[in-house]
Each structure stands twice: as C-alpha cells, then as structure tokens.
Image (cartoon, grey):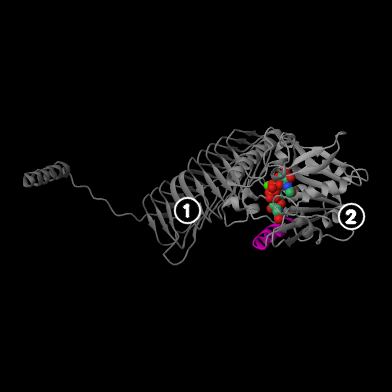
Amino acid sequence: MNDLAALILAGGQSRRMLSPLSKVLHPVAGRPLIHYPVAAARAAGASTVVVITSPKDRDTVESYLVSAFGRELIRVTVQDPPRGTGDAARVGIGALDSDTRRVLILCGDVPLIAREDVEKLASALGPQSPLVVGTCRMPNPRGYGRILRDADGRAFAIREQRDLASEAEHAIDEINAGVYAVMADRLERALGELRPDNAQGEYYLTDIVPAIARGGAVGTVDLLPDAVAGVNDRSQLRLVQDAMFARIAERHRLAGSSIASGVYIDDAVQLGKDVTIQSGVHLRGKTRVGDGSAIDVGCVVSDSTLGAGVTLLPYTVVNDSQIGDASQLGPFAHTRPGSVLEADVKLGNFVETKATRMRRGAKANHLSYLGDGDVGENTNIGAGTIFCNYDGYSKQKTQIGKDVFIGSDSQLIAPVTVGDGAYVATATTVNQDVPPGALAIGRVRQSNKEGYAPRLRAQLEARKKANADKKK
Ligand code: UD1
Ligand code: CA
C-alpha cells in the first residue's frame, strides 16, 4: 500500500537561465536545487517521489537523485514535449503505483519549501477536501496564478496571469504557490478532463481546481513567501541562495554556535557544539567541524573533517583533508587533498600540504611545501622546507620519523627517509636516507676572506662609474 507519493514537476524548458545545465541542477548551498523539494516531500512522508523532466535533463537529474536518495524512493519520467503543468502531472501519475492514495505535487524549482509546509497540506487533505492548494498573499502578485473564491469564500478556480479577465481579478493578491496535496483518484479523473483552452494553449494543472470543486471543497493552506520563491533566472537563483544560506546559519546559531553574518555554510555541513565562525568563511560539501573549533575570517573549507578545538586563522584553505583535535592552521595555510593532520599539529603562514600525514604534535610554522610526506610525532619542519616530491614524471614519498628537526631552507629529494631523532642542518639538500639519530649536513662550505669587503666595494663602485661615463 502506497499511502503517500509525490510528483515533482521539472519538465519545463527553463530558457531564462541561459544555461546548458538543467535549471534544477544549479547549486543552492552545495546541493542541486531539486534536492530540496524532493527532501521536503520525503520528510513529509512520501514513500515514492516521481520527478518529471525533459528528455535533455533526464539522465543528469536521475543520476543525481538516485545517488542522493536511492532507487527505492526515486522514479524519473520524461515529458516530451512540454505541454504544460497539467500534462506533466499526467505523465507523472503514469509512474505511480496503482494503489497510491494521496499525492503531493511540488515544483522542482522552488527550493525553500520546508517539510512543515508540505505536512500542512497533507494533513488538511481528507474526504471533505480532496484537494488542498498552497497559497500565499503577495504584495506584488504579478506573474502568479490568482485564487478565485466564491461569495462564501470557497476557492473554485485559479486564473493564470495571462488569462486574467477583469480589474478585480488583477487586484487579487492571493496567489497559487504551485504546491498541492490531492487524493490520487480525484487527481487522475481531473487530469483526464483537462483541455488546453487558455492563452498559452497548455494543459494547466490549475484546472483541476474547478473540476474537483464541483464534487467537494478545495482546501487552501496559507504559506509564507519563502515557500513560494521559485527560480526562473539567475537573479532569482541568487535570492534563494541567500535565503538558504541565511536559514542554514540561523539553524546553527539556534543549535549553539556563533556564526557571523556573511558566512556560507552548505546544507550538508555538520557543526559540533559551540563552534565560532567569522565572516567571509565558506564551509562546503561534506565538511564536519568538531566541538569548540574556531574559524577566522576568509577561510574556505571543502569536504574536510575538523576535530574538536581546531583553530583556523584567517584565509586558510582546507580541501579534502582531516584536521585533528587542537590543531592550529594559518593564517594563509593550505591543505590539499589527502592531507591528514593528527592532533596538536601546527601549520603556519604559507605552508602547503598535499597527501601528507603530520603526526601528533608535528609543526611546520612558515613557508613550506610538504607533498606526499609522512612527518613523525613532534617533528619540527623549519621555514622554507620543500619536499621535492615530483621529478616531472612521478610522485615520490618523503618519510620523516618522530622528534626530528629539519633546519630551515632544506630540501628533501624524494624518495627519502629520515630516521627518528635525526637532525638535518639548515640549508641541507637531503638526497640520501638519514639514519635515526644522525646529523645530516649538506650545504656548501663557507669561506671568509679577511678585509676583502672594502676592496670589493671599491671595485664595484669603479665599474658603476665607468659605465655611467660611457653613456655620456
Ligand atoms: C505555475 C502555476 C501558477 C503558480 C506558479 C507558482 C500553472 C498553470 N500555473 O505557473 O498558478 O502561481 O506556478 O510558481 O500550473 N513544468 C513541467 N512541464 C511543463 C511546464 C512546466 O514539468 O510542460 C514544470 C516546470 O519545470 C516548473 C513547474 O512545472 O518546475 C512550474 O512551471 P512554470 O512554467 O514555471 O509555471 P508558472 O507559469 O510559473
Ligand atoms: Ca515558475
């Protein structure tokens, strides 16, 4: 028994996006637009969600939705050609199980609709009201279908903008939000009766209202404007993105984190307790942040896990990395994919890691590139150290034990291993393994020429003067 199913209309052409990408796959807070109405329908109890797309969008939309929600929930069908919202719904019901009792209908391009909105519609549905329409009062109703009510206040029709007949109809500020709950048998019958006799020559889903009103009352549920905000162009896309980011930040504030304004947290990101985030921070993808961590201005963290008590100082970029408890990064540090920092690690200014493990207590405080490495516990990497991991053909590993000191301005030419407790003198080029406890020193020997500096200056001065005389 399939009690509740949902149809998500997404078969329109969306020309106003001016984009090769399907409108419903444009991102909002790290997820494609269409994710949100599908998630709202699922949260409200739909056990099947049928998505109606154009032939062009079918594969991309289906592969995203199946990966996000699973094959159990998602069915994608194609409407070709797009002959209106009523035609789309007719295509959609063809994919429903025959024992489906109630149907939710949502638009694929209206992402701010919440589970609570959909639940209100579903719970207003019953034998007395076989159709419930989401409505909203709008100061500027232009472009929307208007709700027509009779003298007793009962909704009996929806009039599209282009079909408005009188001044009085133009003045109606109660609009059709484009979301419905309807008994499946009544929907099927009403869709069968649709005729394209309107200004656009389309099959209007809204024409099920008069058909069902003849045999029962049509209920309405008044929704907030957010639930209605649709995306037809990139300007509206930006509006819903802003609203979604504001909503997500507020959710984390109410859960006990301090989030400044101008912070962009994707929907899938998870924050622990008492996290502090300053403005200009972007937390993207599947990022997770542990309890008590603090992220200062301008940091960008993507698909990464931060432990508890982590500090990111300004303008740190963390990408596909794991950062252990109580580590401190930045300002201007950069961890690239595959970086694993265990607890209490420090990376300072202009330190870049890639596919490198930094074990507990390891430090690299200034100006370093640490690629394809493994750095042991409590090892200190001096300023300007480079792991030369790439010979132009392949990548090689640099392995450094625990309690090692790497002096400033050293290069380690991979593959190379430095044993526990070793000491690499400043400015050494390490091109052979260093045994545990050894001192490696490989710099050019310095010689001092006593009293030579004034002679050198005099020579240089004379050369400069000769050159200047030549020019005259
Ligand atoms: C529709 C409603 C209008 C309501 C508004 C709310 C109708 C006739 N009008 O108008 O009353 O106020 O939504 O936003 O329903 N679609 C298809 N196949 C089609 C045409 C559209 O799947 O052949 C899909 C679109 O991709 C979109 C949704 O249906 O997701 C709404 O279509 P759209 O053309 O945007 O309808 P509106 O004119 O905005
Ligand atoms: Ca629309």
Task: Name the residue located 53 percent from the left edge and 55 percent from the top edge.
Answer: 356
Q: Amino acid at mark 1?
A: Leu
Q: Can residue 34 be seen here?
A: no
Q: Identify which residue, 416 or 135, lies in the foreground.
A: 135
* Vertical comparison of 368 with 415: above or below: above
Q: Report the front residue among 333 and 99.
A: 99
Q: Which secondary structure, mark 2?
A: helix
From what the image shows, is residue 16 above or below residue 312?
below
Name the residue tied to disc 1: 370
Name the residue furthest front.
Answer: 166
In the picture, measured across the screen, residue 291 lies left or right of residue 50, that is: left
The answer to whether residue 324 is left or right of residue 224 is left
Give percent across and percent down for residue 376: 53, 52
Residues 180 and 276: in front is 180
Q: Which mark is residue 185?
A: 2
Structural crowding at the residue carrying mark 2, measured as other residues with C-alpha within 10 Å and reported as few (<14), some (14–19) or many (≥20): some
Q: Secondary structure at mark 1?
A: strand
Give the percent coordinates (x, y) of residue 153: 85, 34
Locate residue 327, reporting x and y percent.
57, 42
Range of the magenta residues?
Answer: 55-69
In the rendered structure, find residue 161 and report the number of the disc placed on it: none
First reached walking from the N terminus: tag 1 or tag 2: 2
